[in-house]
Each structure stands twice: as structure tokens, then as C-alpha cells.
Image: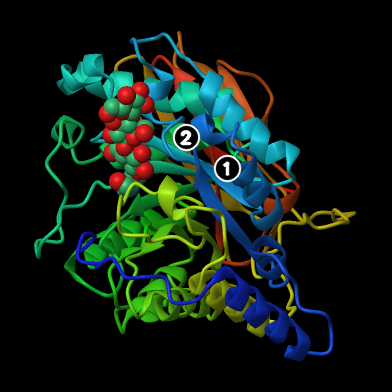
Amino acid sequence: MNLRTGRRRTLLLSAAVASAVVAASIAVIGTAEAATTLGASAAQSGRYFGAAIAAGRLGDSTYTRLLTTEFNSVTPENEMKWDATEPQQGRFTYTNGDRILNQGLSNGSKVRGHALLWHAQQPGWAQSLSGTALRNAAINHVTQVATHYKGKIYAWDVVNEAFADGGSGGRRDSNLQRTGNDWIEAAFRAARAADPAAKLCYNDYNTDGINAKSTGIYNMVRDFKSRGVPIDCVGLQSHLGTGLDSTYQANIQRFADLGVDVQITELDVAQGGNQANVYAGVTRACLAVARCTGITVWGIRDTDSWRGGENPLLFDGSGNKKAAYTSVLNALNAAGPTTPTSPPTSPPTSPPTSPPTTACSATVSLNSWNGGYVATVRVNAGSAAVNGWTVTVTLPGGSAVTGLWSATSSSTSGTVAFRNVAYNGQIPSSGSTEFGFQGTGSGPTGSPTCAAG
Ligand code: G3I
């Protein structure tokens, strides 16, 4: 990870000097007044600037002052992990996760969920499971936690750190990996079914440029996109040493080009002569890619960091702004006000008045386990555009739909008609769209039918 290579150096700028630099930069940037906090300056280009926070520090007034004034996104540093949320199998505790959630929501911040499945910080009971028992427990964990936070999480790190370090570009060995290579896509499908509104991210470290590990992840994301596995974003943790890889921005760009958002999820930089420059370089790289939607630093003050002694954050132990803070703020403000970069989310305003009855077709891909399944349905237009569609699926006896996204349904069992929602009713000629549902029992076996109009 190259995390421990940073040397301790004396902070070169005093708080007073740093403040003066901020004030000077505000005076010269643009015609509009430059924003004076990280969150507000990131918001000028439709992005967020967040911090990982710990429930145990929320009673610290300096900490909460910085948190509420500077940041417009929060990530729980540990409170939503598996060991924290399901310490005993089937018994869920959300007390500290909810504290982080409510802290963020009450401040008008986005909340990033971190992390549904990870080989580390598993509760003891999960560590001792394997095979089908572990797979079922893991999918149940994803479903339960994502359901608890349904509609409130901006983006979930659905799977964390599943790729190996070194040159293989392959998966890391873990108890989860040993349940089968499809464990990651099963987790993403379960997360989508539980909380269709959350962006679903794959998150990892040592992905700070184009290298074997990031290429392995890139290939997985490309495969997921081609097969309709629900994935919306890639988290590049960015625990950095004293330099920035020359391909850092190009790596962000290649993920964006696959059609996923990119988020810098756990940024911290070893303190050294280059710390401020590295922070600025990361910020500029994100701003340069339209689908890089935000940056999260992994802690607020140096004394809050997991990298003890490396002083890797934007505020010193007393809560003073460091040179690195100023360089990030200036980089954010230099981008200036622009339109938000996320793809449009508004549904079409007026439905067609006399929809044509052009043919469409549908295919189902199933991910099943003992007692349940997730079905992903691709709806294809023929040679003409489709304005509205209904896909009919027959479920076997004992099967019932328990979750649904990107469609409405006529019933939950038997013959079920799925109708488009506002934003995905119009499919261009030869184009396609997707919806999905989760159910108990066995998934549909026959071919679905599709009616346009
Ligand atoms: O809360 C207990 C405390 O009661 C106990 O006395 C103490 C004794 O060790 O441990 C405390 O828990 C620690 C916890 O942090 C809270 O401080 C755990 O031991 C410690 O392992 C845990 O470390 C966390 C680490 O993930 C675990 O792998 C760090 O805070 C957290 O910053 C770090 O975050 C990870 C991301 O989730 C994923 N990417 C890498 C990143 C850095 O390792």
C-alpha cells in the first residue's frame, strides 16, 4: 500500500499563514466570490467533499465544528461494517451507524455507506463459516443492512478490497472468494434489490494509477456492465505516499468511460514536502473527469487518522488548516462554477399521448441461491423506438417477489406484469434498458414476453 513510507516532517505553514493564503486566493479567483469551505467549493461543480467520521468522536466540539462547516458528505469509518452491524448472526445493531447517518442527514450531507462485504472486520461467527452457509449469510447481511438504510445512502461500498495486491490482477483469497467467483455480483444484485436508489460501488486501494490491480477491477466492471450486473461506481481509496502516479487521472477516466461514476473514497497522503501538491493533484484529477463525483478524506485531523504518526490529513491535531487544506480549496475553486456532472436524473415530463405498438423482447438473467434469487431483465427495442413496455413473467409456485427496481409490478406471484417507470419507458431503436427483482423460492424459468406501448 506504500502507506508507511511518509516521513514525519514539521508542518511548514503555521495556521496563520495558511489562513492568509486562503484569504488571498479568495480575492483573486473569478468574478463570483470563491467558496470558503471544502464542501461549498466542491458543490460549485456539482461534487461533494466528504470525510470519514467516527461515532466516538462526535462529542468533540472541534471535530464536529470542522465536520459540519467544511464537509458535505460523511462516511462511517467503522460503524456500518459487518462486525459492527451484525455482531451475532441475524442480530443487527445500528446504533452507531445511525448516529453517523443522522449526523450527516441533519447537516444536509450525503452519506456514503461503508462497507457491506469485506474480508476484514467480519464478526467472528462469519469468519467461521464457509460455502453455502457463508454465501447465504453474506447475501442476507447485504439485504438486511441495505434495507435498514434504504433511501438514505448516497452510495454504498457494496464490496471492499476483493482484489489481490501484486501483479496478478486477480481476486484476493478470502472466505468470501472461496464461496465462488460470483460472490461480488450476487452482493451487488442483492444491494440493488434492497435499495434501488443507492449508487452501488466497488471500492479498493492500490488503485492509484493504471496497474495490474486496477486493471483487474476495470475488467470486472466492464464485464458487469456488459452483463447488466448492477454497478454504478468505483471507489478509488487513494491512501497515498509522497508522490502521485502519473496515470492517476487516466485511471479515473478509463473507469468513467465504462459508464460508472468514480469516487475518491479514502484519501490521505503521507506528510512530506509534497503533501499539499499531491492533495492538489488528486483534486484536479477528479475535477478533470466529469464522472468523478466527489472526494472523501479518511478522517478530519491528523490525530483522527488510522495512519498514526504520518499526519496525512488536512487539519492538524488542533484543528488548524494545513497547507494541504489550502491547496485543495484552491484547486476546487479554480474549477469554478459549472453545471453538475452527474447524468440527468429527471424523468421525461410528458408521456406519449398515443404510444405506438412496436415490438420489443426481453431476456432474464438469474442469480439464484438456496431459497432465493435476483432476476435481472433486459428489455430490448426492435428496429423502431419503444414508448412504454410491459414484460410478463411467470413465477413457479412458491415463488414471490420481495423487491423490485426500475419497474412496477401487477402482483408478487404467479403471472406478473412488470411495467416501465417514467425514466426508462422510452427505448431508442435497437436500444435496451433494464429492471430487476428479488424473490423467495425459485426464479422464473420460462421466457418472458414483452409488449410495447
Ligand atoms: O473500538 C475498539 C476499542 O474498543 C478497542 O479498545 C480498541 C483496541 O484495539 O479497538 C477499537 O477498534 C478499532 C477500530 O479501528 C476503532 O478505532 C479496531 O481495533 C481497529 O482495527 C479499527 O481499525 C480500522 C481499520 O479500518 C480496520 O481494518 C480503522 O479505524 C479504519 O480507519 C480502517 O479503515 C479502512 C477502511 O475501512 C477500508 N480501507 C482501508 C482503511 C484503512 O485501513
Q: Residue at x 55, y 58 (%)?
A: 432
Q: Residue at x 16, y 30 (%)?
A: 175
Name the quadrant of the N terminus.
bottom left
Q: Marks 2 and 1, how far apart in space? A: 9 Å
From the image, tell me which residue sits under label 2: 191
From the image, tell me which residue sits under label 1: 198
Q: Is residue 252 left or right of residue 36?
A: left
- Nearest the camera: 333 or 437? 333
Q: Disc 2 on helix, strand or loop?
A: helix
CB-based contact (under 8 Å), mark 2 and mark 1: yes
Q: Residue at x 54, y 78 (%)?
A: 327
Q: Disc 1 on helix, strand or loop?
A: loop
| Horizontal and vertical percent position of residue 62 | 62, 45
Q: Is residue 311 left or right of residue 434?
A: left
**Quadrant in which residue 100 is drawn:** top right
| Horizontal and vertical percent position of residue 439 | 47, 21
Label 2 within 8 A of ligand 1 by Cβ? no
Kind of residue at disc 1: Ala
**In the picture shown, does residue 278 fall above or below 389?**
below
Kind of residue at disc 2: Ala
| Horizontal and vertical percent position of residue 70 | 66, 57
* Of pointers 2 and 1, the one earlier in the residue sequence: 2
